[in-house]
Amino acid sequence: MAIKLNKDIEQRLLESIQRYCAANLDEEVGELKAKLLLDFCLREIGPSVYNQAILDAQSAMQDKIAEIETVCYESEFAYWKKK
């Protein structure tokens, strides 16, 4: 599954890449080079980050499901115990 960004997010990322290169690599990078780098990152690094995010979400959901038994439990036949 290819990672597709909306235009606004993509533009902000391109500007961020250009700013990073200027600040940390002492190199001015044009929009084309920034786009090529972003495309590489999305294709090469993106799937690993995406897959890890899915695993983290699954783990968080499994933890919440495991809590249901204690959080959503109501004692049965408790009317007479209150009196």
Image (cartoon, rainbow, N blue to C red):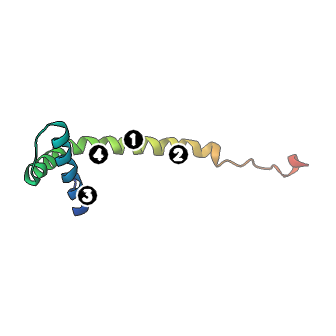
Where residue 50 sits: x, y (%)?
Answer: 29, 45
Is 59 rendered above or below residue 3? above
From the viewer's perspective, is 16 left or right of 68?
left
- Name which residue lies at 24% across and 56% down: 12
Where residue 35 sits: x, y (%)?
Answer: 12, 52
Q: Indicate which disc, 1 or 3, sits on the residue closer to the N terminus.
A: 3
Q: Secondary structure at mark 3?
A: helix
Q: CA distance from mark 3 to mark 2?
A: 33 Å
Q: CA distance from mark 1 to mark 4?
A: 10 Å
Q: CA distance from mark 3 to mark 4?
A: 17 Å
Circle nearer the viewer, 3 or 2: 3
- Sort mark 1 into few (<14), some (14-19) or many (20+) by Cα contacts within 10 Å: few
User: Can residue 80 be seen in this snapshot?
Assistant: yes
Identify which amino acid the numbered label 2 is placed on: Ile
- Name which residue lies at 20% across and 43% down: 20
Q: CA distance from mark 4 to mark 2?
A: 22 Å
Q: Indicate which disc, 1 or 4, sits on the residue closer to the N terminus.
A: 4
Does the CB distance between marks 1 and 4 fall below 8 Å? no
For disc 2, the marked residue is 65
Q: How many marks?
A: 4
For disc 3, the marked residue is 9
From the viewer's perspective, is 8 left or right of 68?
left
Q: Secondary structure at mark 1?
A: helix
- Sort mark 2 into few (<14), some (14-19) or many (20+) by Cα contacts within 10 Å: few
Q: Secondary structure at mark 4?
A: helix
Q: Nearer the viewer, residue 83 or 13?
A: 13
Does the CB distance between marks 4 and 2 fall below 8 Å? no
Label annotation for residue 50: 4
For disc 1, the marked residue is 56
Label annotation for residue 34: none
Identify which amino acid the numbered label 1 is placed on: Asp
Q: Indicate which disc, 4 or 2, sits on the residue closer to the N terminus.
A: 4
